[in-house]
Image (spheres, helix red, strand yellow):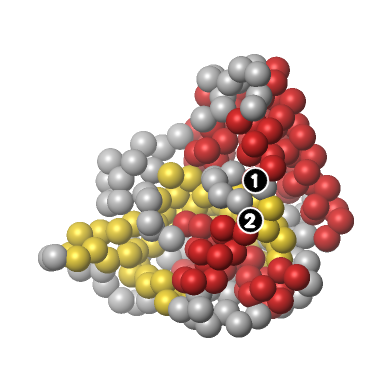
């Protein structure tokens, strides 16, 4: 089986060698758990291996994303070079504006704007031969649909298209808790290929970041709750270490 190595320290070990190629993985967690950072590092590591990646944001404009993540990952000296050379494409704010200005949430205006957004994504994939995609985030996108069923049909249509184009995709999603438990599963979590949870768990007077792979089709994977840390050089997943 072909696998896509994330390149994130320790994560490929949890995944028994990487994400099965073409899988579509929801990356879920509360605010500040590192979803966007992990989504970007997945693309950054691929770009360093010569695999073009697309980070498509519905939350912030591309310049802000690059500025913030450059301040987080200060040891990524080639980050902007990879962007300039189109091995790493950061886009999305324009489509967010189109959605925001749609006539009625969930109505024909929203569907038309979503169609333009999807066309923009597939156009960049074809133009730059993208193999890795991160969409940040499905939670923002969901806000524009009054009917959950319509949202799910629409997002599934986009994800099917990405799979046909040969992309391995991470989709970030907010959950209303920083901790383990109290998380309500949505239908899309059952249909997707993978589900990775990020947490900020209380530990005495501080919080500890942790990761848990709940689901990954086509491969065995670790089921252990594993500590992680975001460092200037990237995310480290400490395989074999205990959270408590």
Label 2's element?
helix
In the figure, is residue 219 to the left or right of 127?
left
Residue 223 lies left or right of residue 57; in this view the side is left
* Quadrant in the rendering for residue 230: bottom left
Q: Residue at x 46, y 78 (%)?
A: 232
List x then y, in percent, for residue 142. Answer: 54, 32
Compute the Cα span from label 1 to label 2.
Answer: 7 Å
Query: Viewer-proximal residue, 91 or 8?
Result: 91
Residue at the image point whose x is 78% and y is 44% from the top: 120
Could you say which disc has been placed on residue 211 in the image? none
Residue 212 image position (x, y, % from top left): 39, 59
Q: Is residue 176 left or right of residue 142?
A: left
Q: Residue at x 70, y 24 (%)?
A: 111
Q: Secondary structure at mark 1?
A: helix
**Which residue lies under the disc numbered 2?**
62
Residue 140: give x, y in percent of width and height.
52, 38
Q: Is residue 152 above or below residue 55?
A: above
Residue name at image x 47 percent, y 71 percent: 72
- Residue 203 in the image, given as x and y percentages of width and height: 18, 65
Q: Quadrant of residue 32?
A: bottom left
- Farthest residue in the right direction? 127
Q: Residues within 10 Å of mark 1 (few under 14, many from 20)?
A: some
Q: Which residue is mark 1?
A: 93
């Amino acid at each position: 089986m072909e696998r896509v190595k994330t390149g994130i320290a320790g994560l490929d070990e949890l995944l028994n060698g990487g994400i099965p190629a073409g899988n579509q993985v929801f990356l879920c967690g509360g605010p500040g758990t590192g979803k966007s950072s992990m989504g970007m590092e997945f693309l950054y590591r691929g770009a360093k291996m010569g695999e073009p990646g697309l980070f498509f944001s519905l939350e912030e404009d591309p310049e802000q994303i690059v500025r913030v993540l450059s301040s987080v990952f200060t040891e990524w000296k080639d980050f902007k070079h990879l962007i300039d050379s189109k091995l790493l494409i950061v886009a999305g704010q324009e489509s967010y504006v189109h959605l925001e200005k749609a006539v009625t949430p969930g109505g024909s205006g929203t569907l038309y704007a979503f169609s333009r957004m999807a066309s923009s994504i597939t156009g960049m994939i074809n133009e730059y031969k993208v193999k890795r995609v991160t969409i940040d985030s499905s939670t923002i996108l969901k806000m524009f649909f009054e009917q959950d069923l319509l949202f799910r049909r629409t997002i599934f249509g986009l994800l099917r298209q990405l799979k046909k184009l040969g992309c391995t995709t991470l989709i970030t999603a907010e959950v209303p808790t920083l901790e383990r438990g109290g998380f309500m599963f949505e239908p899309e979590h059952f249909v997707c290929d993978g589900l990775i949870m990020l947490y900020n768990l209380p530990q005495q007077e501080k919080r500890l970041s942790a990761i848990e792979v709940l689901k990954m089709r086509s491969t065995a994977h670790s089921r252990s709750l594993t500590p992680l840390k975001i460092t200037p050089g990237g995310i480290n997943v400490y395989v074999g270490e205990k959270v408590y």
